[in-house]
């Protein structure tokens, strides 16, 4: 008869339970992974189209309609910080993993948005951005109009910013403050990235680089500004090459 109080019994029982539950969890994870991957893809497509077209344009669309619109009007490329277009498949590029690499070695996705499926007219370019907020990572997508100077929209998200403060970067009103801002100084012609000002409730409608800030969320706001400056500077060679082409 087994001695349930013996060390051998306890160790054997623990090993068996570990193997059984480990196997169950592995099977569950394997079954759920395709669905999880699809959810991640849908979120990315939603963010890209929202940055380019605005919330009103896609807010009532179903997941299937979002995917159809994305497939018909978006062309994805991968570039280096030199502006060189690579043959790398966009789906294989993980922006978070690239963020950990030195800036001049990163592979950078770019999404070209066309007016319709015949792809005869570009309406915007969307650039993923990644950085750090107060507590954890922040990220987003910045859409430039076809002039490659004017921001048509942004979408930001975060992992752990403070609710009601830094987490407000996901609010449509806050993101809307970037619409119409310029990434090029109108006087010098040099790249000048829009940034959150200190304080909130100020009117910067006459300044193409200043954006009304976030009260009580200074570090998150600085993180967003730094993220935009860092990544749009990396995209600069590509932007200039596209402007010269047209």
Image (cartoon, rainbow, N blue to C red):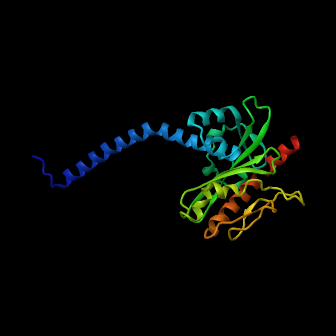
Q: Quadrant of the C terminus?
A: top right
Placement of 136 over or under 128, stated as above or below: below
Looking at this view, name the residue that lies furthest to the right: 187
Q: Residue at x 76, y 48 (%)?
A: 144
- How far across and down, in percent of the image, does residue 34 sit? 49, 36
Q: Residue at x 35, y 45 (%)?
A: 22
- How far across and down, in percent of the image, does residue 101 sit? 65, 54
Q: How many labels does the image show?
A: 0
Q: Is 182 displayed left or right of 65 in the figure? A: right
Q: Residue at x 31, y 47 (%)?
A: 18
Please say whether residue 205 is visible from this viewpoint.
yes
Q: Is 215 displayed left or right of 85 in the figure? A: left
- How far across and down, in percent of the image, does residue 154 sit? 68, 52
- How far across and down, in percent of the image, does residue 197 sit? 72, 67
Please say whether residue 108 is visible from this viewpoint.
no
Splitting the image into 4 quarters, where does residue 72 fall? Answer: top right
Splitting the image into 4 quarters, where does residue 71 fall? Answer: top right
Q: Nearer the viewer, residue 213 or 193?
A: 213
Q: Is 153 displayed left or right of 68 in the figure? A: right
């Amino acid at each position: 008869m087994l001695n349930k109080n013996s060390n051998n019994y306890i160790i054997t029982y623990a090993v068996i339970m570990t193997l059984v539950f480990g196997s169950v969890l592995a099977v569950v994870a394997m079954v759920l992974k395709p669905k999880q991957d699809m959810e991640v893809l849908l979120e990315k497509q939603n963010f890209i189209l929202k940055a380019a077209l605005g919330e009103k344009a896609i807010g009532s669309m179903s997941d299937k309609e979002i995917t159809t619109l994305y497939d018909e009007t978006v062309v994805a490329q991968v570039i280096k910080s030199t502006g060189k277009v690579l043959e790398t498949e966009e789906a294989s590029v993980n922006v978070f993993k690239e963020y950990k690499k030195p800036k001049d070695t990163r592979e950078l996705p770019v999404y070209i948005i066309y007016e319709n499926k015949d792809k005869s007219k570009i309406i915007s370019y969307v650039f993923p951005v990644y950085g750090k907020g107060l507590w954890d990572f922040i990220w987003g997508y910045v859409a430039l109009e076809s002039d490659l100077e004017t921001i048509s929209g942004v979408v930001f998200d975060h992992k752990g910013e403070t609710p009601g403060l830094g987490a407000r970067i996901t609010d449509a009103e806050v993101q809307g403050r970037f619409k119409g801002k310029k990434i090029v100084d109108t006087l010098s012609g040099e790249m000048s990235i829009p940034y959150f000002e200190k304080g909130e409730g100020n009117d910067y409608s006459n300044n193409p680089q200043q954006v009304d800030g976030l009260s009580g969320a200074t570090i998150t706001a600085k993180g967003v500004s730094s993220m935009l400056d860092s990544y749009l500077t990396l995209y600069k060679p590509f932007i200039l090459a596209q402007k010269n082409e047209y």
